[in-house]
Amino acid sequence: MKLIFAVIQDQDSNRLLNALVDNNFRATKLASTGGFLKSGNTTFIIGTDDIRVEKALSIIKENCKSREQLVAPVSPMGGNADSYIPYPVEVEVGGATVFVLPVEQFLHF
């Protein structure tokens, strides 16, 4: 058995949840915040049998696309202003960061 943690952009969360349910995966959906852009993310926790991990990963990959987005930089409060860029920059956001962990024991009460 495996435990999959998938951190995705909020824009992709409903589409991913529907695809997981359509393919008989159970998932817990948690609100989370990214550290780099400090924007909303969604973290999915999915428990599945070893043989279904690749299917879950393909569903995540199909439904979580990266995209370009303009981001206004945060000014450095009391920090070094040498590297501060005063205008919006285009960064790649979205996609998915996925961790697959072994599960030693699973209990359902």
Image: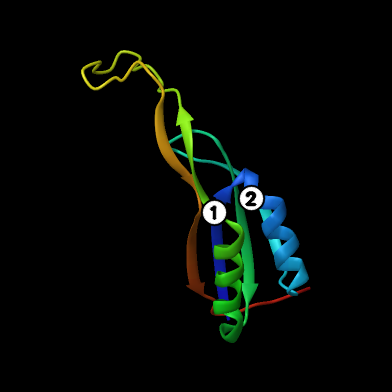
Give x and y (percent) for residue 42: 61, 48
Q: Which amino acid does label 1 sit on?
A: Lys
Residue positioned 72% across, 52% down in the render? 14
Identify which residue, 70 or 108, lies in the foreground: 70
Instruction: Nearest to the eye among marks 1 and 2: give it.
Output: 1
Identify which residue, 59 or 98, lies in the foreground: 59
Q: Residue furthest top?
A: 78
> Is 29 above or below relative to 78?
below
Residue 81 lies in quadrant:
top left
Is residue 18 toward the left or the right of residue 84 in the image? right
Residue 52 lies in quadrant:
bottom right
Q: Is mark 1 on a helix, strand or loop?
A: loop
Give x and y (percent) for residue 43: 59, 52
Q: Residue furthest bottom?
A: 51
Tell me the residue that label 2 is attached to: 12
> Is 17 above or below relative to 50?
above
What's the distance in space between the residues labelled 1 and 2, CA to CA? 8 Å
Labelled pair 1, 2 in contact (Cβ < 8 Å): yes
Residue positioned 75% across, 75% down in the render? 24
Q: Quadrant of the C terminus?
A: bottom right
Q: Which amino acid does label 2 sit on?
A: Asp
Q: Residue 65 carries which label?
A: 1
Residue positioned 54% across, 78% down in the render? 54
